[in-house]
Amino acid sequence: MEIAAIQTHGLTRRFGALTAVENVTLSVAQGQFFGFLGPNGAGKSTTIKMLTGLLEPSSGTMEILGQPFTAGALELKRQIGVVPEGMALLGRLTAPEYLRFVGRMYGLDGATTDQRTEELLDFMQLSNERKKLVTDFSHGMQKKLALAAAVIHGPKVLFLDEPFEGVDAIAAGMLKAMLQGMINRGATIFLTTHVLEIVERLCSHVAIIHQGRLVANGSLEELRAGVASTLPGAEASQRLTLEEIFLAIVGAGGTEAQQELSWLA
Amino acid sequence: MSAPDIAFAGPETAGPLSRLARSQYAALAAMRWQMFRNGMRTSRGALELGARAITYILYGALGLGLSAGLGAGAYAMASSTAARFLPVLFWTVFLVWQMLPIMLASFQEQFDLGILLRFPLGFRAYYLLYVIFGLIDVSTITGGLCCLGLWVGLTIARPGLFAWTALALIVFAAFNILLVRAIFAWIDRWLAQRRTREIVGAIFLLFVLSLQLLNPALHQSRHSRSVSREERMAERRKTAGEMWPWLAKANAVQRWLPAGLAAQAVKQAGEKKAAPAGGSLGILGIYALAAGAVLAWRLKAEFAGESLGEAPSRAKEAQAAERRSAGWFAGSGPIAAIVEKELRAMLRTMPLLYAVGAPLLLVLVFSGVFVRNGAPTSSFPFSLPVCLVYAQLGFTQLFYNSLGAEGTGIQLYFLSPTPMRTVMLAKNIFHSMLFFLTAGVAAVLAIFRLGLPPAPVLAASAAWLLFALPCNLAAGNIFSLTMPYRLNPGRLSRQRGSQASSLLSLLVQMGEMGVGALVLWLCWFTDRLWLATPILLALAVIALVIWDRGLRNADALANRHKENLIATLAKTE
């Protein structure tokens, strides 16, 4: 039996009285491009933080590449790359300095770090900005740098929290190609984004979290079939988009969304 | 389809007292109150409040002490014929008001109003808020209490001066408030960019060197330590005689400066010269307006959304420097990486550079306390350790909030396979190197001014440094992991500090100093000064063991406080 890249069982996180993530059990196979969707505040970032060791679960277990994952699992961390919610950048360094720093923090030797830094800067089209401090980067440039830092050590599992937010269309196209290349070479990608078109195009499997609970999990076709089965005949026969699937599952087509804000002209 | 018509709430004047502005002040006050109240939800918040209360009580006590002294002085001068010396008191208040914020910059919590610029806030309202927020700082409280002391002292001595004194002190206080705010706003501006920072640094250095040369210039002949009392008194009388014309000239100049004008207004009012007193007050008012205008000039640019982000300039030289410095840190391990990163980040983080550099420069200036008639005094043999103790105060933020400047980068440490103990070890190594470098410079400066101390004092000073460093590192690692606060790297003022961390770190440092002072005093008192070194070395070994234990526990501690660390350092407000 093949070892799952990511496996959680009953993953729960409470903040006082609030349960942000409740009893999430999922499995992501190796080599899978996995989309993790949910409305704002659903628990996506909290789940990623737990899966990457930034947040302690209240209960439940996690395994990465078949090994129990805790904050102290340092060897396992070498296999993981992350673009977290806050991007984890160091504002007072330049982009090359930051990438070299990250590479060395992940245990790469100096020569490899330098070589990959240059390649990544070229790839991310940040070579012309090598003297600029990260704090002076635009949001999109910071995203690209965060993504470069997440992959510099060649991770086997990549967690991406909104990686395309603020990135221009040209760069987004390149990033997608790069991520697809990683998948082709056997890496696993766990992606959260609000851009459903990207998920639809890239991800083979999707899970949807709503109010902290996993409400859907499976391949895109499985989700489509599941939602279609609940719809009347004419609608069910149409090929549903991911947006339609998502709205149907999280129930956002209700009265709240249709309410008018009468004071808006 | 036509574009939607956005209905605005109607035209609003941007005046500082307009309805919009008033509602904004109310919202801001409510926001500050809510932040304060929400801060109390956690035990850390409650600790902060307690620490802040203690801090303000201490500052208040300092202010009241000064106030009482100045009040007594004012009373004595006004009720005798010494009213011509009143300017001395006003200049004292001026110096306290302007110097205190510089000395306490790293201990104060200040609110950055830049976050308000996204709202429809008029410039005058922004300016007013900037000034009002400045009223809640230590210098204003202390300066205000000093003014109150002067007012009480002068009023008791001359009840008829009640109104004039109040008016003069109000204008004088307004001038001081606006000036101190303007100075900090401009210093922040200059320090934000490399080129201007270099110029300011050079000017500051020249200023300090000038002060250094002032002493020998005033005392051209140096004396041996065995000058008799009579000779010394005669020499003083001679010096006073030589200085009198200079003092007269200085007095003529100071009359036209703010502190002199305020004192003059009071004095002239006491002599029933209402018109000249009014004139002096008028000129003082012009000074206040000028300070306000200088502040407005700066804030106007800030209000317009200027970006002070700095890009390293002179690309080729920088590239060459980068290659050279990369050679020093050729090691590829995490420790070398963190040390290199710390060095680069520190060179670009003005508050830290300032915190380390300022005490060093003040050591140079204030070591003059131990110099009499151009020669070091023989009465106090421990001037070198005192200078070293003062120089190490600049490390408070580095030691006790070593993660403060990481920002969102703190997440990287938790994501990477590098254990937190390695991160803290690397930071400790860097800070130790800097500590010894600073101590070396402070020692050279002190010895240059005061001469070489006796060998046992020199050895004991070195031993105390070896004791103090691991103490600071051990406590600093714990404080950094458990009580972090975010450091804005581009600003000298308007930082959000932690009063609890500042107060507790001050207590630890005072403990180290107390132990050192006690050991030195006991050994000196028993005439066994040589014994201080082995005692302090033994204490250093104990401190090292404690530091080592603490470092081994850093991973567990970091994990326990991980959420707080990330929330505090990576948060946006």
Image (spheres, coloured by chain):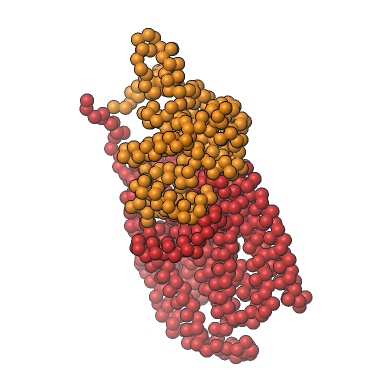
In the drawing, does residue A131 fall left or right of residue A217? left
Hey, which quadrant is residue B70 in on the image?
A: bottom right
In the rendered image, the residue lying farthest to the top is A233
Q: What's the residue at 59%, 71% (across, down)? A: B387
Q: Position of residue B94 (x, y in %)?
A: 47, 66
In the rendered image, the residue lying farthest to the right is B526
Q: Position of residue B64 (x, y in %)?
A: 58, 60
Q: Position of residue A174 (x, y in %)?
A: 35, 39
Q: Position of residue B381 (x, y in %)?
A: 66, 78
Q: In this view of the protein, can residue B265 be seen by the observer?
A: no
Q: Nearer the viewer, residue B509 or B379?
A: B509
* Position above or below: B238 against B437: below
In the drawing, does residue B173 fall left or right of residue B469? left
Q: Nearer the viewer, residue B6 or A166?
A: A166
Hey, which quadrant is residue A16 in on the image?
A: top right
Q: What's the residue at 45%, 31% (across, down)? A: A33
- Quarter of the image with the N terminus of chain B is top left
* Position above or below: A100 against A178: below
Q: What's the residue at 39%, 75% (across, down)? A: B253
Q: Colour of chain A?
A: orange
Q: Colour of chain B?
A: red
* Position above or below: B22 against B386: above
Q: Nearer the viewer, residue B319 or A114?
A: A114
* Position above or below: B204 against B101: below
Q: What's the residue at 55%, 64% (across, down)? A: B434
Q: In this view of the protein, can residue B92 be seen by the observer?
A: yes
In the rendered image, the residue lying farthest to the left is B2
